[in-house]
Amino acid sequence: MARYIGPKCRKCRRYGVSLCGKAKCALQRRPSPPGPRSLRRRKVSDRGLQLIEKQKVRFAYGVMEGQFQRYYHRAALRPGVTGTNLMQMLEERLDNVVYRAGFASSRAQARQIVNHGLVAVDGRKLSIPSAHVRLGQEISLTDRGGHTEYAKILADAIRSRDVPGWIEIDRGALKARVAALPGPGDWEPHFNPNAVVEYYSR
């Protein structure tokens, strides 16, 4: 599936928040938006603000527009709050769970190691980043992944990485389990799912 392959931090600078997940984001060095400086401030409409919020979520999770719309329509059909359902579905993507569990330093890196076949779900290799990880499923490295140089680096790096409460982690065995469903507060506070719902519901 097609995806954005341009400079990640350019999007961070465009929207004024770190979306790439990198520890050294270019936004820290150059907080101004990319491109030529505008001579006058332009007022952004409500629709424009909703679009910005939608794009922030979409780029952060590395989802293209068509796929993101399908996530929204599926979230709208579920019982409960549509915005919460949408964010919950995005959090349950395999690449995001790998990132949240500390197996990768960014979602882009998590997507890469999943694509390379280094990740297993319940002991079986799964190389689809958008795969849905269900409650109780276990994430680990494959046999091939466990013998790579990356696994040796990860064994040291994972000790200092924070893991959300909905994921149980065995740092010694490099295994993680989805122990609960992610809820409000488990995703970045600068996301506004209500604005995303308003954008698509018009």
Image (cartoon, grey):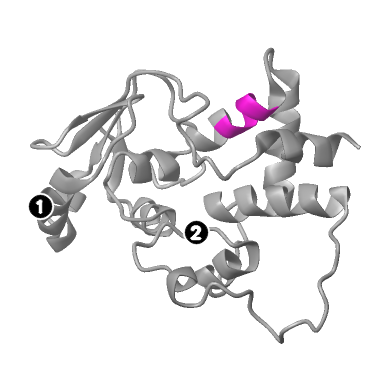
Q: What are the residue bounds of the magenta stretch?
A: 83-87
Work out whether 17 lies above or below 71.
Answer: below
The location of residue 80, given as percent across then percent down, is: 67, 14
Work out whether 65 lies above or below 32.
Answer: above
On the rendered structure, is 115 left or right of 184? left
Q: Who's the residue at 27% across and 44% down the image?
A: 102
Mark toward the viewer: 2 or 1: 2
**Residue 84 lies in the magenta stretch:** yes
Quarter containing the N terminus: bottom right
Q: Which residue is at the front of the view, 68 or 102?
A: 102
- Give the amino acid at mark 2: Ser
Q: Quadrant of residue 24?
A: bottom left
Residue identifier under label 1: 156
Q: Which residue is at the front of the view, 74 or 171?
A: 171
Check the image and name the residue furthest to the bottom.
36
Q: Who's the residue at 48% across and 29% down the image?
A: 185
Residue identifier under label 2: 18
Between the residue at mark 2 and the residue at mark 1, the CA separation in whole angstroms equals: 25 Å
Task: Say what secondary structure mark 1 lies in.
Answer: helix
On the rendered structure, is 11 left or right of 160? right
**Residue 81 lies in the magenta stretch:** no
- Give the amino acid at mark 1: Asp
